[in-house]
Amino acid sequence: MKKGKIKNMFSYGIGAVGLDLSYGLFYSFLSKYLTDILHLNKKFLLFLTPVARIWDGINDPLMGTIVDNTRTKMGKYRPWILIGSTCNAIVLSLLFTNPGFELGGLPIYIYVAFLYVAWGMTNTMADIPYWSMVPSFTTDPKERSLIATVARSFSGIGQGIISIFTPMVLPILSETMQNGEKVADARGFSLWAIICALCLVGFSSISVLNTKEHHLTTPKEKFSFKKMFSIAKNNDQLLIFMLFAMLSNAGWYMVSGVGVYYFDVVVGDPGKQSAFNLFGAVGSILGLGVIPIMMKFTTRRRTYQTSLGLAIAGFFGMMLSVKLASSYLLMNICYTVASIGIASMFVSQTVFLADIVDYGEYKQGFRSESITFSMKGFLQKMAYTIQTIILFAGLDASKYNENLHAANTPQVKGAISFMMLWAPVILLVLSLLVFTFKFKLHGEYMEKVTAEVNKMHENY
């Protein structure tokens, strides 16, 4: 690969660090902030997430359409990455900061609901154009896989920073003392969110200023709402992808989202979450090497199935480690195995979307990167919705008390343990079955699609 392409690839990847700082803080720690710091009613939170997703169902494809029809000297993707990341940084800071509203009062509910929806919108503004750039760099499937792997590597760094350091940083930035030690409070969450927001803008700027867009195609017609939903409806492989990716992502989110409750309530030591997430980060780093190595010996389809198999085995091992051996060290080791599978799974999903863009053009006669890639952001939010519905329903049904911590009832601990250890395995197994029996973009058929699309591009 040429020097210019290498610089482009790594500069592109840096942007994922900032995006995942915001993404990780929102998806892994917002629930704990809303229940334990702001003391919001769990039934309200159970209602809020699905409502926000209804709007995303309109907003995400709309953003994809806007990006597809953007024409500037900077290209069509980079301007929106910069605008979106800046807006998302502002919303993230405000979402984790209470401006002084009385806890439990109506204003705090309105404030949180507005910013919760706004975070999804501003994240979409940055996330869709960012991941939509992958097909614009190259038409070579191997180079796409490499670019996606590099971007996912940087994405893993952002996730690792959040998952490992947040449990340690929050008490340091906080003022509240409990049993002679600092514990996370409103001040800690607010300062940490502001730090992450500044990093989001900084890393996104580096990415935007040091990348170039290639292989851009112009939509042949203006897209209406009817056309946008037609693209999703008529691309059967996009719908299949949405289903199996949503299930697998939800399984992953269960662990990252429930973990903060699990170590506080069940384990009784929130500090152990950092060690647990460190093992996961090591697994994520190792997992990013799975794609290039396995692709030398087997197909992309088999690589993805192996990735899901590793994740299932790892999460199942976590469950056995706790239930049979009561060993949290063994649980951490199994989490490393699961994270290897999850990391390689995410890389494959990004590449699959690039293939789905080609398939859509082959089948429908026109190309739509951003609208197709907008489905990625939407499915991640839907996966998070599945996680939050299970989480808040479980907390509410078991009568979780945010003031009791490890003194919560056995019923609460049992519910949290199920959500942490059993739910991910169930969701991932379902995802593997859907992928294996329904997804057909592989082998000779995908080679035919790629060849036909390349011929179409020669005529542009």
Image (tube, grey):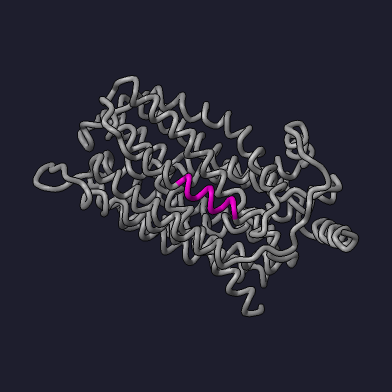
Quadrant housing the N terminus: bottom right
Residue 444 drawn at (x, y percent): 83, 60
Q: How many marks?
A: 0
Name the magenta segment's main secondary structure: helix
Q: Residue furthest front?
A: 73
For the record, the magenta segment spans 79-88
Q: Is residue 213 left or right of residue 448?
A: left
Image location of residue 357, percent across then percent down: 74, 51
Q: Nearer the viewer, residue 264 or 104?
A: 104
**View extreme (left): residue:** 180
Query: Image point 73% across, 51% down: which residue?
Result: 356
Q: Nearer the viewer, residue 189 or 323?
A: 189
Q: Nearer the viewer, residue 171 or 275?
A: 171
Q: Is residue 243 visible?
A: no
- Residue 74 position, x and y percent, is 64, 59
Taking the spot 83% from the left edge, 56% from the top edge, the residue there is 449
Q: Quadrant of the C terminus?
A: bottom right
Q: Is residue 410 above or below residue 210?
A: above
Q: Is residue 455 above or below residue 269?
A: below
**Which residue is rendered at x = 62% and y = 33% of the image?**
57
Q: In the figure, is residue 268 to the left or right of 54?
A: left
Asked if residue 207 shows in the view, the reply is: yes
